[in-house]
Amino acid sequence: MNNKNALEILATNVRKYRAINRMSQEKLAELSDLTQQYICSIENARVNPSFITLVKITEALNVTFNDLVY
């Protein structure tokens, strides 16, 4: 799997679990101590977030790391 595919999978899964939780980008940003713009960049596969950032997002969405990356 190349980086582009991995980022697209992550983007899709963040959007999916955010929708399941009926959460706005703003709310996810607040809960994960990130900016709405950064959440948008993740959901559009424009950035490669750090492991710590992914942990914050998994906690905010109440999902596992595997849920986000597979």
Image: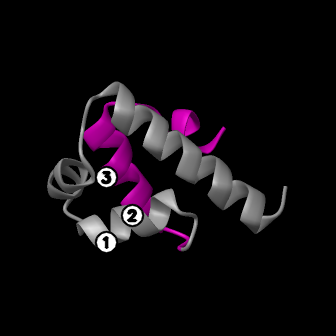
Whole-number angstrom distance, CA of label 1 to CA of label 2? 5 Å
x 56%, y 71%: residue: 48
Whole-number angstrom distance, CA of label 1 to CA of label 3? 16 Å
Residue 56: x, y in percent? 31, 52
Quadrant where the N terminus lies?
bottom right
Along the line of sight, the residue nearer the viewer: 5 or 60: 5
Q: Quadrant of residue 67?
A: top right
Residue 34: x, y in percent? 24, 66
The residue most toward the right is: 1
Principal secondary structure, stretch drawn in magenta: helix
Query: What's drawn in magenta, residue-wise?
Result: 47-70
Residue position marked by numbered label 2 in the rendering: 40
Tell me which amino acid carries mark 2.
Answer: Cys
Along the line of sight, the residue nearer the viewer: 39 or 69: 39
Between circles 2 and 3, the one closer to the viewer is 2
Between circles 1 and 3, the one closer to the viewer is 1
Residue position marked by numbered label 1 in the rendering: 37
Tell me which amino acid carries mark 1.
Answer: Gln
x 36%, y 33%: residue: 19
Residue 23: x, y in percent? 24, 38
Residue 63 is covered by the magenta coloring? yes
Secondary structure at numbered mark 2: helix
